[in-house]
């Protein structure tokens, strides 16, 4: 996964804060944010997950003219091309863990880019069979190529819905 | 609103209700804001008939995002240096979620003070849906 340009925008932060039910005015009111220690509208801690919007190949977003695995005329419009949980009773990929390290506060006006690399892989015996874990490390860098946030995502592939 | 190391002690805790009766609409808001349009989180027909779940459920990242408030309300968002979670159970529409954070350690690292907290989010039945940890920078 690579994202070439992920601009941190005030409207996007506002929408994201609303979606997580956070009424803190620092995300919505530039005056409150300017008077705060960081002096600008900060991004909520999990905001960089919304970099998905800026990943041209992000698989969990329908694209015009392409089959989508959610329902329309039928219960599914396509076989999923990625582990998505939607493959009809076979393996199901679920988000198991998410970790962020913040090297400095992320604020509106930053323009990030991101690069991902595979982390470790391991297996565990669960109640319903073998669980396969995979880690993905994503670094979000600013315009000066300084790392702002390091993210570690752990996905687990199970043998069916719980 | 930053916190001083001298004002904080190990064992201090906070509790916060994150959501009362989680709506499908809020889950859709999260899909739009985050960009994760996995139909498991918005498409009942797909979730039941194709994926074999009882219905749609919240993105784990929505629960993580909501839970983050307990850290940012306490320590200030710009002071958070680490935040990580495990997703323990799925969260379904109608859920009422409450987060608790407890100070595990107050540390001095090269003259900078930090608090480490552990976090647990439970649903209306007291079932843990998420566990995590966070670190925040403190004033001296």
Image (cartoon, coloured by chain):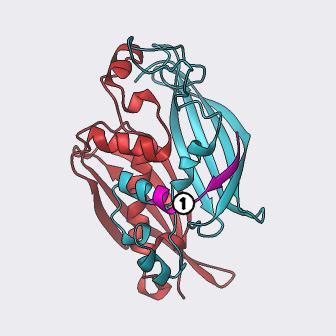
Chain colours: A cyan, B red
Q: Position of residue B57 (x, y in %)?
A: 35, 33
- Vertically, is B96 above or below A159? below
Judging from the image, mark 1 belongs to the subunit labelled A
Q: Can residue B55 be seen in the rendering of this structure?
A: yes
Q: Position of residue A15 (x, y in %)?
A: 41, 54
Q: Is A3 inside the magenta-drawn segment?
A: yes
The residue wearing badge 1 is A9
- Vertically, is B54 above or below B127? above
Rendered residue at 34%/29% (across/down): B56
Q: Position of residue B34 (x, y in %)?
A: 48, 46
| For residue A36, side relative to residue A65 (left or right) | left
Q: Position of residue A130 (x, y in %)?
A: 56, 22
Direction front: furthest residue: A65
Magenta residues (range): A1-13
Q: Can residue B9 be seen in the rendering of this structure?
A: no
Question: Label 1: few (<14), some or many (≥20) within 10 Å?
Answer: some
Q: Nearer the viewer, residue A151 or A71?
A: A71
Rendered residue at 46%/18% (across/down): A160
């Amino acid at each position: 996964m690579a994202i070439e340009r992920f601009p941190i925008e005030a409207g996007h932060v506002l929408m994201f804060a609303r979606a997580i039910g956070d009424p803190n005015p620092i995300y919505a009111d530039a005056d409150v944010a300017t008077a705060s220690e960081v002096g600008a509208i900060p991004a909520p801690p999990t905001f960089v997950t919304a970099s998905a919007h800026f990943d041209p190949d992000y698989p969990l977003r329908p694209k015009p003219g392409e089959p989508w695995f959610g329902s329309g005329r039928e219960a599914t419009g396509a076989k999923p091309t990625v582990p998505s949980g939607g493959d009809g009773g076979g393996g199901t990929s679920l988000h198991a863990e998410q970790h962020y390290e913040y090297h400095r506060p992320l604020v509106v006006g930053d323009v990030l880019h991101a690069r991902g690399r595979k982390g470790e892989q391991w297996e565990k015996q669960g109640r319903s069979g073998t669980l396969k874990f995979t880690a993905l490390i994503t670094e979000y860098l600013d315009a000066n190529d300084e790392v702002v946030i390091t993210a570690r995502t752990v996905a687990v592939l199970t043998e069916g819905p719980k | 609103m930053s916190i001083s190391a001298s004002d904080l002690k190990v064992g201090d805790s906070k509790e916060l209700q994150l959501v009362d009766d989680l709506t499908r609409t809020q889950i859709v808001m999260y899909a739009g804001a985050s960009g994760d349009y996995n139909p498991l989180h918005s498409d009942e027909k797909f979730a039941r008939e194709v994926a074999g779940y009882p219905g749609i459920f919240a993105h784990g990242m929505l629960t993580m995002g909501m839970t983050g408030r307990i850290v940012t309300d306490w320590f200030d968002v710009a002071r958070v240096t680490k935040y990580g979670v495990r997703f323990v159970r799925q969260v379904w529409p109608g859920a009422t979620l409450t987060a608790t954070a407890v100070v595990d350690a107050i540390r001095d690292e090269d003259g900078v003070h930090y608090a480490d907290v552990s976090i647990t989010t439970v649903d209306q039945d007291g079932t843990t849906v998420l566990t995590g940890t966070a670190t925040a920078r403190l004033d001296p």
